[in-house]
Image (tube, helix red, strand yellow):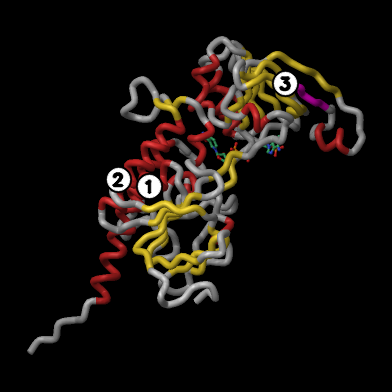
Amino acid sequence: MNENSTDSDPVHDVVIVGTGVAGLSAAVYAARADLEPLVLEGPEPGGQLTLTTDVENYLGFPEGIGGMELIQNGKEQATRFGAEFTHGTVERALLAERPYELELSTGDTLRTRALIVASGASARWVGAENETELMGYGLSTCATCDGAFHRGDDVLVVGGGDSAMEEALFLAKFADSVTVVHRREELRASEIMADRARDHDAIEFRWNTELEALYGSRDEGITGATLVSHSDGHPTAKAESGVEVERKTVDVGGVFYAIGHTPNTEFLAGTDVERDEAGYLVTRSDGVGRVTTATTVAGVFAAGDVADPHYQQAITAAGTGSMAALDADAHLETLERAAEPTEVSP
Ligand code: NAP
């Protein structure tokens, strides 16, 4: 037991880490199953949806819905059924024995029988000047979410992996031109995705180039960007070490970052919860090969982007959130049955 917790601290049935769409969906289902979930709101309350403006592809909202509004509605819905919310980031999880313990950034320790990890994945940001100001206002990390707002625009996509190719191909449906800005002259993307992007008339590439600064305002959106280039690649690092680089400012109406995501799973390091090379949680199938949200530690479940390097959609996160709550409920019932005294025949 952790030094900050005592036997008299309450033991929750289920703690849900994360208040993105996966965590909230898990909270609604867990609360309706009378598990009285405690939901932990971390450093990015509401998750990635709060970084976008309108969500137009979430089923049930024919006119679209604001990302923030969707999250607020979800929180209200979970609260209505009895979910409780508290602030704090899990710094360390102790999962070797039950009840599981979570040490929080606040200094508190939570004790729980089951844990749903819905801590999401954070899109990596480039570090360009003005990006914090303009994120959500012409700067985006999700073409599927925001691409349709860029009809007729010239847009940039930063990155050279499959995500960048996918974003560029999606954006080419709306934008006048899409320029992929990549820091080297070789793509990381798979051949098939790279070929599709290379063969598209509206997509061009700017090699050995990085984004240095963005221009515009929250009212008018993005209006321009400064790009730096060097013939040997990685121009920003070269500029920082004093090497001369070429700078060019271009007019653009939108910029999309596609330089990868980092799953927020660091707090599970040192536990038996398996993570893949990139840090995403690995979930297990059941005895007959069907998908579940169970991780490699019994009673610990994963929902949303934290276990999904591929789909990363709000609707899939909501789906796995509900699955995790159902899986947690079934697990707790199994624990209860196992604890019941065995009847002895007279
Ligand atoms: P990724 O494969 O890690 O690629 C990230 C790209 O961003 C790389 O080209 C990298 O450049 C660049 N980058 C990283 N940090 C940067 C920085 N600070 N500034 C500028 N550029 C930077 O990530 P991903 O494209 O998101 O893909 C993640 C995984 O999902 C991959 O396994 C991918 O195959 C998979 N995926 C599959 C599909 C599909 O099959 N349809 C779609 C999307 C993603 P370097 O190349 O120089 O390192």
Numbered disc 3: secondary structure: strand
Where in the figure is residue 137, as x and y percent of width and height?
A: 58, 24
| Residue that badge 2 annotates | 80
What residue is rendered at 40% in x and 39% in y? Answer: 316
Q: Are marks 2 and 3 in contact (CB under 8 Å)?
A: no
* Magenta residues (range): 225-229
Q: Residue 106 colored magenta?
A: no
Q: Which-is-in-front pick, marks 2 and 1?
A: 2
Q: CA distance from mark 2 to mark 3?
A: 45 Å
| Residue that badge 1 annotates | 321
* Quadrant in which the C terminus appears: bottom left
Q: Nearer the viewer, residue 265 or 109?
A: 109
Numbered disc 2: secondary structure: helix
| Residue that badge 3 annotates | 225
Q: CA distance from mark 2 to mark 1?
A: 17 Å
What residue is rendered at 58% in x and 42% in y? Answer: 261
The image shows residue 36, relative to residue 223, as above or below, that is below
Residue 243 can be seen, yes or no:
yes
What residue is rendered at 55% in x and 22% in y? Answer: 169
Q: Residue 159's quadrant in the figure?
A: top right
The image shows residue 316, relative to residue 23, as above or below, that is above
The quadrant of the picture showing ligand 1 is top right
Secondary structure mostly taken by the magenta-highlighted segment of the chain: strand
